[in-house]
Image (spheres, grey):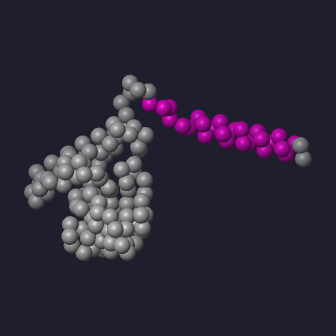
């Protein structure tokens, strides 16, 4: 029995050492941080979640969250639709193949003011919108460097 205990402890120590060796080194203050890219093919909108999700209003028009909708807060953490019941949110969103709102990224009012007022009716508007969205995402990363 003693032999198996030693073998188990040796295996655990080997697994822990190999897992530690695979961790990337922490960034020092002088190193540039990783830049988080803004998602593509998204649209800005003010989403009002009803008291009974998945029913929502997207810029005042009735809509629904798709089954399995992914909503990410400012820290890129997933938020459940029940937590947002009865709230009005500044967002950028993406639809799924069936046309329902599937992916949502929550913004604060200042971020939405930067990207929400951009006209996306012409190709230059789309380029400007993505430039502003990338600025918002990179500014978030400078504020919270631990966000992936």
- For the point 33% across and 60% down, the residue is 104
Q: Quadrant of residue 81?
A: bottom left
What residue span does the magenta drawing correspond to?
3-27
Reply above or below: 11 against 120. above
Residue 54 at x, y = what percent? Answer: 36, 73
Residue 46 at x, y = what percent? Answer: 24, 62
- For the point 19% across and 51% down, the residue is 113
Reply above or below: 91 against 128. below
Q: Quadrant of residue 29?
A: top left
- For the point 67% across and 41% down, the residue is 15
Any part of residue 90 in sight:
yes
Q: Farthest residue in the top direction?
A: 30
- The reply to whether the magenta stretch includes residue 18 is yes
Q: Farthest residue in the right direction?
A: 1
- Count of residue discs: 0
Nearer to me, 8 or 90: 90
- The reply to whether the magenta stretch includes residue 48 is no
Reply above or below: 89 against 148. below
Q: Quadrant of the C terminus?
A: top left
Any part of residue 99 in sight:
no
Nearer to me, 124 or 141: 141
Judged by its main secondary structure, the magenta piece is helix
Residue 124 placement, left or right of 66: left
Q: Quadrant of residue 142?
A: top left
Residue 79 at x, y = what percent? Answer: 42, 59
- For the point 80% across and 42% down, the residue is 7
Residue 124 at x, y = what percent? Answer: 10, 51
Reply above or below: 27 against 68. above
């Amino acid at each position: 029995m003693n032999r198996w205990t030693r073998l188990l402890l040796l295996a655990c120590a080997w697994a822990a050492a190999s897992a530690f060796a695979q961790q990337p080194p922490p960034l020092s203050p002088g190193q540039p941080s990783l830049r988080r890219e803004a998602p593509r093919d998204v649209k800005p909108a003010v989403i009002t979640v009803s008291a009974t999700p998945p029913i929502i209003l997207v810029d005042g028009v009735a809509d629904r969250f798709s089954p399995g909708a992914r909503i990410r807060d400012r820290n890129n953490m997933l938020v459940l639709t029940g937590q947002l019941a009865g709230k009005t949110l500044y967002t950028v969103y993406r639809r799924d193949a069936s046309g329902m709102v599937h992916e949502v990224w929550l913004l604060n009012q200042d971020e939405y003011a930067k990207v929400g007022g951009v006209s996306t009716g012409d190709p230059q508007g789309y380029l400007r919108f993505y430039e502003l969205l990338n600025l918002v995402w990179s500014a978030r990363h400078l504020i919270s460097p631990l966000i992936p």
